[in-house]
Amino acid sequence: MIDRLGTDAVQGFLEDTSNLKSGWSPGVFFPESCEEAAGLLRSAVADGRRYMVAGNGTGTTGGRIPFGDYIIAMHRLNHIGEVEQTDEDTAILRVQGGALLQDVQAKAAASGWHYPPDPTEKTCFIGSTIANNSSGSRSFRYGPTRKHVRAIRIALPQGDLLEIERGRYLADSEGRFSLELPIAGQLSFMRPDYGMPSTSKHNAGYWSAPGMDLVDLFIGSEGTLGIILEAELQLRKAPEQVIACIVWFLTEDDLFAFIDKARSGASGVAPRAIELFDRNALEFLRQSYPEVPRNTAGAIYFEEETTRENEEGCLEAWMTLMEECNAPADLTWAALDAVGLTRLRDFRHQLPVQVNEWLRRQSETKVSTDMAVPDGQARQLYELYRDACEAEGFTCIIFGHIGNAHLHLNILPKNREEFDRAKRLYRKLVTEVIAMGGTLSAEHGIGKLKSEYLVLMYGEQGIREMVRVKKVFDPYLVLNIGNLIPTNFYEIET
Ligand SMILES: Cc1cc2nc3c(=O)[nH]c(=O)nc-3n(C[C@H](O)[C@H](O)[C@H](O)COP(=O)(O)OP(=O)(O)OC[C@H]3O[C@@H](n4cnc5c(N)ncnc54)[C@H](O)[C@@H]3O)c2cc1C
C-alpha cells in the first residue's frame, strides 16, 4: 500500500465541487487490495486515526473533504472484471470501488450491454456512486443506482470484510437485522424507525423500508457505514439506438403541458430522460452556445430508446406532442445518431460544469438545492424557486430532472450580503419542500454541506435513529465522521 504524509500529499484531496475550502488532513493512504483497506480500519483505534474515504472528487457536498482525518483514497482499487451473461436480458459485471464510471460503462457497451445509472459526470468512481446512490437523467426510466447493484463487498469500520448479496440479509417482520461477524461479533439491530418521502428520487439519510435488504442500508449511506470496495452490477441489453431532442417553448404553460404529456406517455412516447432548462439557464449556456434561441420561456431535453423498426413512429409521436404544446418545430434540436446524441448530452452537461467553472472565479460560492417533491408537483416546485428568487432579486438558474419532479436551483450571489440572504432563503425553501412531502436531497446526498438541514426533515429523533445504526457498525466513530449525520448528535469532539 502506498501512503503519503504531509501537506503537499493531501492537497488534491481537500476539494470536490462544493467549494468547501477549509479541509485539512495529515496524510493519505492508497490501499491496493480489499484486505489493505480493511486493515487500515481494523487498526484505526489503536493507531489513533479517523478516516475519510475519497472517490474522484466530483461530489457536490464536501463528502470526501477531511477535517483532520486521514484519507483512504480509492484510486488503486480500480479493477473491472468480465461481463457475465446471466439470462437472455441481463448480465453482471464485478468491479472495484475505484473504477471510473465511464470505464465501467465502456466495458459493458463493448459487449452489447448497458449500465443504466448515469449521473452525467462520468469521471466519478463507481464506489462513490453506490455510496451516494447517484442517479441523473436516465433515472426517470431506470431509477437510481441502488436498482442496479446486486451485491457489494464492504470494509466495515471495525475491519470486517463483508460480502452482501441481495436477498442474503433481510430485515425480519419487525424490522430487525441479525448477522455474525468475525471482529464486530453478533450484530442485531432494528432498521431506522422513520418514514421516507414519497418522491420518486430520494437520497437523504439511511434508507429504511419494511422487509428491506441490508444492501440498501449501505447504498446511499455516504461512506458512514463502511467502504464499498467491490460491487456486482446488473447490466441490461444495450438499446439499439437512442434519439434525443431539445425542444424550446415560448410560454411556461406550454412547457409544463409538454412535461405532463411526456411523463404520462401521451401519444405513445416512452422517454428515458426528461430534463428542464429554465430561461436563465439558457442565457448562461448562450455564452458558449450562441445558437441558443432567444426569448424562450425554457427548454426540455428528452431521450428515448428506439429500434430501427419503430424509430419513425417514435419521432411522429414526439412531433404530435410538440405540435399540441406549441413548440416551434423549426427551433428543435434533434439527435438521431451517436454523434448528435453526444452533442446534445454535452450541451446538457455543460450547464453544471460551466456554473462550477464560473463559480471558481467568483468571491462567493453558490447556494444550490437538490430537492425533489412527489410526482405531480413539479410545477409547484419550479414556481416556488422562481418566485422566491425573483422576490429577493437573486441571479439564479433552475434546471434538471423535471421528469422526477427534481430540480436544481443554483443561486449565484454577487456579494456576501446576498450569500447570507440566499442561505436564509435556502432554509425556508427546505421547510416548504418538506411540507410538500419532498426530500432534502434527491441524488447528491447530504455530505457536510447539508447535514445541518437534515434535522428539518427527520426531526431530532430521526437523526438519533441514524446515530443508533451508525454506532452498530462504527462504535468507535472512525469512518466518515461529519458526513450525513450532524456531528453535534454524536456528542463527541470532532
Ligand atoms: C458537473 C457535475 C454533474 C453532476 N451530475 C450529477 C447527477 O446528475 N446525478 C448525481 O447523482 N450526481 C451528480 N453529480 C455528483 C457526483 O458526480 C456524484 O455524487 C458522484 O457519485 C461522486 O463520485 P466521486 O468519485 O467523485 O466521489 P467523491 O466526491 O470523491 O466522494 C463522494 C462521497 O462518497 C464517499 N465515497 C467515495 N468512495 C466511497 C467508497 N468506495 N465507499 C464509501 N464511500 C465512498 C466519500 O467519502 C464522499 O462522501 C454531478 C457532479 C458534477 C461535478
Image: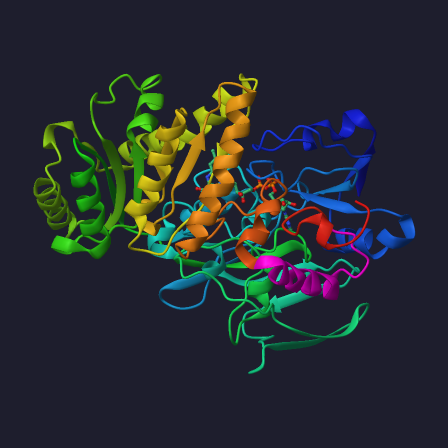
- What is the quadrant of the N terminus in the image? top right
Does the magenta-highlighted stretch encompass residue 29? no
Please tell me in which quadrant of the rendered image residue 25 appears: top right
Please tell me in which quadrant of the rendered image residue 62 appears: top right
Q: Nearer the viewer, residue 31 or 298?
A: 298
Q: Nearer the viewer, residue 386 or 441?
A: 386
Residue 345: give x, y in percent of width and height: 34, 35
The residue positioned 41% from the left and 36% from the top of the image is 409
The residue positioned 53% from the left and 17% from the top of the image is 362
Any part of residue 114 in sight = yes
- What is the quadrant of the C terminus in the image? top right
Dominant SS in magenta:
helix
Residue 384: give x, y in percent of width and height: 35, 41
Does 53 appear above or below 462? above
| Residue 17 shown left or right of residue 346 in the figure | right
Residue 401: give x, y in percent of width and height: 36, 44
Residue 111: give x, y in percent of width and height: 41, 51
Any part of residue 102 in sight = no
| Residue 274 shown left or right of residue 473 in the figure | left
Q: Nearer the viewer, residue 385 or 301?
A: 385
For the magenta stretch, what is the residue range? 459-479
| Residue 9 shown left or right of residue 219 in the figure | right
Q: Nearer the viewer, residue 3 or 432?
A: 432
Ligand 1 quarter of the rendering: top right
- Furthest residue in direction front, as rendered: 391
